[in-house]
Image (cartoon, rainbow, N blue to C red):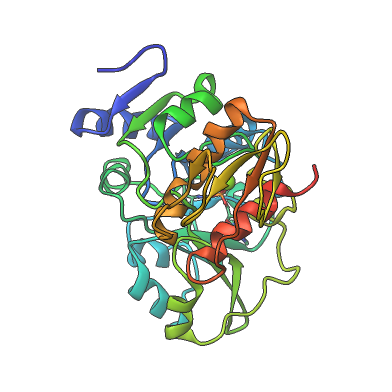
Amino acid sequence: MIDIQTRTVTADAAGIARAARILRDGGLVAFPTETVYGLGADATNGQAVAAIFAAKGRPLFNPLIVHVADIEEARRHVELSPRAQALAEKFWPGALTLVLPRRKDTTLSLLVSAGLDSVALRAPSHPAAIALLKATGRPVAGPSANMSGQVTATSPAHVAESMGGKVDLILDAGSAPLGIESTVIGFDGDRPLLLRPGAIAREDIEDLVGPLGPPGNLIQSPGQLASHYAPRASLRLNAQEIRSGEVLLGFGEVKGATLNLSARGDLKEAAANLFAMLRELDRTATKIAVFPIPDTGIGEAINDRLRRAAAPR
Ligand code: TXA
Ligand code: MG
């Protein structure tokens, strides 16, 4: 059954079939992945992809991630170097996005690449995303399902709040389990670069391919803009105390926190809570202070998002 008000359906067999029909017809479907909710469109349909940019208010120079079922499907669209293949074999399906050279004969819309000769691909592991890709039978372009520059949507309620009137359907599978976007890896020749820290820790990737280089100026993309993921409230990072007018977003053992990302100091739990708690505090507070978060493992991605959320607009 569809909730008419929010256009939300449960991600069961009927919901998936309905979503797949909409995607094949060129519509927009917000869908769950293990990282965050995606705003999906048929990646081979230029008009459908253009509708993503319009709905999000996303600048046209910002390329989109395309979701594929597996390595075989990826191979139809990009050149997979041995290194890229090793990464895909280890981390797919999962929260790793690989930016790779487009094949000349790819059926992907040019717009997903925003004019670059590369494309970002990822095979998601969420069962509902896998089922949706299978039912659709097409690669699905999917940036996060929120307005450009604003706090990432990690639940169907966030999607409805952020872009309710602009999607044809929201596929509901509850909160996204990881709660933070995928790690994006690009290449400079054969050298792997960390374009965006994310749900898979740098250390785990470096175990396989050695040290990751810095992003450099190879691309212009949303996760690299200084201000992104921004709440309305101002954000003060690495706060050791609460100042007048502030609410505190805590981590670990800390007194006086309005919300705590993880009272037991678990970075995975903190990542899963990050965007939902920012949204919740943003409803009432105008100044948010954030306790220090260790920069190890997935903490690197949390601190990256917090810095951009705090950046001047
Ligand atoms: O977890 C995720 O990655 C989520 C879910 C829905 O899969 N998607 C997501 O997409 O976060 P989006 O559009 O919000 O972020 C796109 C990121 C950019 O920040 C950029 O780093 C990278 O993907 N990207 C996409 N295409 C690229 C390209 N051709 N070259 C370089 N980077 C690219
Ligand atoms: Mg985003």
| Residue situated furthest front in the rendering | 255
Query: In the rendered image, which quarter contains the C terminus?
Result: top right
| Residue situated furthest right in the rendering | 312
In this picture, residue 41 sits left or right of residue 224: left
For this rendering, which residue is in front, 7 or 235? Answer: 235
Tell me if residue 255 comes above or below residue 201 in the rendering. Answer: above
User: Which residue occupies 43% across, 34% down?
Assistant: 30
For this rendering, which residue is in front, 149 or 192? Answer: 149
- Quarter location, residue 234: top right
Query: In the rendered image, which quarter contains the N terminus?
Result: top left
- Quarter location, residue 46: top right
Residue 92 position, x and y percent, is: 35, 66
Residue 230 position, x and y percent, is: 66, 41
For this rendering, which residue is in front, 164 or 269? Answer: 269
Q: Judge whether residue 67 can be spotted in this image.
A: no
User: Which residue occupies 33% across, 62% down?
Assistant: 93
Tell me if residue 302 comes above or below residue 54 in the rendering. Answer: below
- Ligand 1 lies in quarter: bottom right
In this picture, residue 150 sits left or right of residue 202: right
User: Which residue occupies 50% across, 47% down?
Assistant: 274
Q: Judge whether residue 284 can be spotted in this image.
A: yes
Residue 261 position, x and y percent, is: 47, 49
Residue 277 position, x and y percent, is: 50, 39
| Residue situated furthest top in the rendering | 4
